[in-house]
Amino acid sequence: MGLMRFICPPDRITESTARQAYLSGYDKTPWKSQFRLVGNEFQMERSVSDSGNLHVPWQVPGRGLLALSTATLMERPEPYYLPLELARGKIGQIRNQLGEWQAMGLSIPPEASERLADAVAFFAQAAVVEHGSKQSNKLSEQAIVKALEAADLLAASYADQVLAARKRGGQKLRSLLGADLGPAVLDEPTAGQFLETFNTAIVPLCWRQIESSQGQFDWQTSDEQARWSCAGGLRVCAGPLLRFDQAFLPDWLALYEDDFENLFSFTTQFIQAAVVRYRGKVDVWICAARVNASEVLSLTEEERIRLVAGAVELVRQADRESPVLVSFDQPWGEYLNRRAMDFPPLHFADALVRANLGVSGLVLEMNVGYYPGGTLARDPLEFSRLLDYWSLLGVPLFVALGVPSNCQTDPLAGRDAAAPESWSPEAQAEWIDRHFPLLLAKPCVQGVFWNQLRDAEPHDFAHGGLFDQERRAKPALARLAAIRRAHLE
């Protein structure tokens, strides 16, 4: 068994943050690990002894819990000093990214270089005083803060310069900006604000809602949503046609949990009925979602892949014109720290793309800040690196996002997932300001979707909508509308 040990200041690693931490190797795939907190020492144990990176939620002043990573560390008997290693990891990451972007011709703002120089200076001081001392820890924390400021400035400059280059000649981007319409038809005030903000509507085709009784289909809500979207001049993205969680699958399907052939048959029947009904009215199909991370119906990985492959082939046969997307949840693979799997998310996606089934693009779903079942909050530079990594598959990417606006209990949330105390409506809007321009600037990204529209109706994640429980628009909606006016058709 491989053991890595880290000394950290008191109370900086709690049971909750320790559960979310993970180690990854050179291929960025997390290892299944076990943690221990022994006094001021944080220990991670895994089945291999390879060098790796530690990723851990870290409380950063003014930012709340943010996932930070060490540089690649070898296993050794003596412990590492965690604040120092997190500062080293972030500074090294920024310097590498800066070098890559400078080689592309990117102009680096002086402010970013100054913040990075400050971070290096703090880190150098932290490295030469007694490791683990209050002084070393304080200097390391200051280095992290300055490095993150440099990362923000660098990412913002990249986004500004790339967006300006892509819009040269006055042409705005044709990227999709959409939101899920939810389980009910929009009321008139919400519908008007939706049309001002988005150019795409995601019409959900929830199997549980449409076929609550076996063999009896109710398409009324979906019909009305599709009709409204077309009338409003929106591009229509329908689906997912298959989603691997309890909120999507009808209760009666559990009767066939141990009968994969019948399960496959019922899935096929629903998908075929949906595609035949809406083909010609849909611009993009989301064929399957959360195909990698959810644990439902006791499916093996092979059965899950077979279901997804069969769904893609079926949609392609019924509608040869519209693009077909497959969505992957938690694309960093955080869930792998709790269970070992043969197919990490990128490998699963690679297998689908290489099979030449007709997958047109991939959706990366990230419900930021939630635990369990969500994606760790990260700075924009980390998002940039993730998208660059997934772009190696050579297919268009789409990003599906959920970001909390509150940390309180949400009675309409279907998932038992909590958000840290630092989230608020203003923090949700600031997250959009900080991350969205970079997402749209990436040439590989052809669309960004918001996962939840309204908190006043049943939804997955607590307070993740753009309208609160009183149906009032949150500041985030205005931010998205401004981004559309500035950059999108």
Image (cartoon, rainbow, N blue to C red):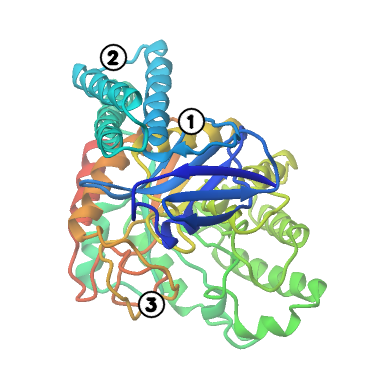
**Kind of residue at badge 2:** Ser
Q: CA distance from mark 2 to mark 1?
A: 26 Å
Where is residue 353? Give x, y as percent.
Answer: 68, 41
> Could you tell me if residue 224 is visible in this image?
yes
Task: Using a 10 Å C-alpha cutoff, classify the residue at mark 1 as few (fewer than 14 neighbours), some (14 to 19) or many (20 or more).
Answer: some
Please indicate whether residue 24 sits to the left or right of residue 183 in the image: right
Q: CA distance from mark 2 to mark 3?
A: 46 Å
> Could you tell me if residue 488 is visible in this image?
no
Instruction: Tell me what residue is drawn at x 66 percent, y 35 percent.
Output: 50
Dot 3 or dot 1, earlier in sequence: 1
**Placement of 182 over or under 446, stated as above or below:** below
Q: Any mark on residue 107, and which?
A: 2
Which secondary structure, mark 3? loop
Where is residue 319? Give x, y as percent.
Answer: 63, 54
Q: Any mark on residue 458, and which?
A: 3
Which residue is labeled 1 in the image? 71
Q: Say which quadrant the C terminus sits in.
A: top left
